Image (cartoon, rainbow, N blue to C red):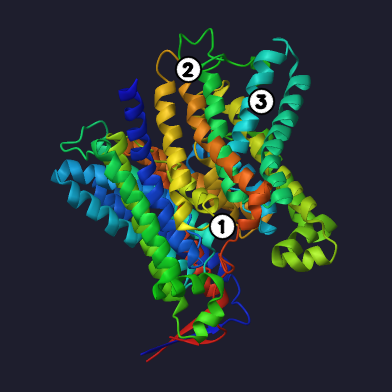
Amino acid sequence: MKIVVRKRFERPPYMKFLLTLTALGLSLTISMIILYITSGIPPEKFFYSIYTGLFDQSTLRYMVPLTLCGLGLILPYKAGIWNIGSEGQLLAGAIITTYLALYIFPRNIPFYLGTPILLASSFIAGGLYAFIAGYLKAKFNLNEILSTLMLNYIIIGIGNYFVYGPWRGETQYGYPRTDIIPEQLWINAVSVGGIRINITFILMILVTAVIFAKMFKQTRFGYEITVYGLNTDAAIHSGISKEKIIILTMFISGGLAGLAGAGEILSIHRQLINVQNVSAGYGYMAILVAWLSRMDPLATILSGYLVAALIASGYTLQIIAGLTIGAVNLFVGGLLIITTALDYLLEYEVEIRW
Amino acid sequence: MVEYMIELISRMIVASTPLFLATLGELYTERSGVINLGVEGLFVLGASVAFTLTILTESLMIALATTLVVGAVIGSIHGLVTTYLKGREILSGLAVTLFSYGLASVIGRPFVGLSLPVRLNLSGNYVTLLALIIASAIASWIILFKLKIGVVIRACGEDPSSAYVMGVNIDRVRLITTMMGSSLASLAGGIYTLGYIQVWTEGAGMGWGWIAIANVIVSLWNPLLTPIFSLLYGGINSMIWMMQLPPYNVSPYLLGATPYLVTLLTLFVIVATPIKKYVKPPAALGIKFEREERTI
């Protein structure tokens, strides 16, 4: 037997899509086996939870932060810049939202004034938090993977300091959480045909996806990002500003993560709780969302839904089989490894000769 | 007062041991040209596996030996994907980390809150421990810079094409160093739970692997310098333990963020001061070695 490997010159149609489906199937099978061995979860329970996850209403709820962060990550990733800090940038947005709503705004601020300010400030806060890493990368060539990771942990410490310390709510019976933000600022999900959807944020996702798709196809900035990612040296020699690409892509992706943070506060928690339960790993899972879409902004909506379904199944497993939610990382990590490995077949063709 | 200082120093050395081991492993991996972000997950997985097995078998040796094997097996996934399959290193590493987080949580879940039947007494032997740390740093320097095997490893990281012409199997060397680095990270996690914190809760050891990766840069890819930041970090960790208690009573959450802030500032000092002249990552770090058409 002989295995011959050749570089591909053209790809069969739908190959990316088929590979993603294969990766999904493989990773779910592996997770099923691991869960069966370690926790004795029978396969039918496992597949039942995956099935419910795909059609559960909560999937639409997890989809919002995942897709917002994932859309944002497309920009730096296309430019070859590794922003791993969505988690922290999301928290920057969540923390600033709570701070403004509770301590700066008058209690009776009208929603048409308060909500836009909150959304805009959360975008800026997330963006500025990402800017720190972007600036350090552009100016000092400090590894952005490490700086964004460190910044994630730093803001978790700061956020929890506020929640467990000076911001602990007066009406919360001593529990570590802030007071509830004024009701008129909430962004509630509405019921559409029996399904609860947060229209505001779903619209925001759709509009951003369309703008990004247009930006990559039709604008100079989108083109510059693509060129910079494909060949950084050539891009710099052709006059594309390294600083501009790094700082802007980081700022925008941080901004969208910050917006997701505002969304978590305004539409889900209505107060700041232990911040690790606010970000809940969405920032890390968004990396998978961005890569599953193969950097296509419109496909991010699909991949965001898919990863959200995995989280929803994780919660179902938690209820029916007593797992902790950390087990979701098994699906997410497995899917990401297998997708990365199968990318090989996009570049090479493998033939087995007998 | 003297006893107090001794306790602080012994805690510092014990805390620095896991970081030192994980750093050393990642240093070998990066010297051969592979970045392994999976180190973070493997540390957490090693912590969970060691704790679970110590309770099940009551044997520290079995537990720690298993962490080595588990690390090599899971690390080989990253090794295979990044070498033979030419996958993206950052993604594959993050994926291994997330996967290991999940695995650690599933494995350790039934054992949360139990106490260890046997203790790994490190703090009593802190002088020996420090000597071992320094000895392994020197040994690693000799291996990497004086022995032929070190030349082979470094050649894969600096100039793989030339090394290939000289008959080195680049992908195999990189796979082996990745597995070795992963093993050490996992062992480090085991030592962290058994010798330092001595309990296991979900998420135990998270963040240490990232610090180890940062430490490789801070140590300028030189094994001789790895104990410095490891000890500094160990010192910060034992200070944190002290500062939470009266009379200081500093918020544990702010203290929890300090190690990361210190690491970020240290990285900043390394790249923004004249020290940056000495920051010379392996030239082929993160770059795939490819030949056009291949027959296996």
Q: Position of residue A49 (x, y in %)?
A: 38, 45
Judge left or right: residue A101 versus residue A264: right
In the depicted view, which residue is nearer to us: B2 or B60? B2
- Tell me: residue B294, above or below residue A50: below
Label 2 marks which chain's residue?
A
What kind of element bears circle 2?
Answer: loop
Distance between mark 1 and mark 2 Cα atoms: 37 Å
SS for callout 1: helix
| Mark-to-mark CA distance, 3 and 1 | 30 Å
The chain that hosts pointer 3 is A
Q: Is residue B242 above or below residue A105?
A: below
Type of residue at label 2?
A: Pro
Query: Does any portion of residue A98 appear in the rendered image?
Result: yes
Q: Which residue is mark 2?
A: A176
Q: Residue B137's mark?
A: none
Q: In which image quadrant can residue A39 be found?
A: top left
Label 3 secondary element: helix
Circle 3/circle 1 CB separation < 8 Å = no
Rendered location of residue B142, percent (x, y): 40, 65
Task: Say yes or no: labels 2 and 3 on the same chain.
Answer: yes
Q: Amino acid at mark 1?
A: Leu
Which is more N-terminal, label 3 or label 2? 3
Tag shown at residue A96:
3
Residue at x 63%, y 44% (from the top left corner): B268
Give the quarter of the image for residue B278. Answer: bottom right
- Give the Cα distance between marks 2 and 3: 18 Å
Asked if disc 2 and disc 3 are in contact, CB closer than 8 Å, the reply is: no
Q: Quadrant of the image for the C terminus of chain A?
A: bottom left
Q: Dot 1 corresponds to which residue? A: A292
One can see residue A29 in this view: no
Which is nearer the eye, B115 or A47?
B115
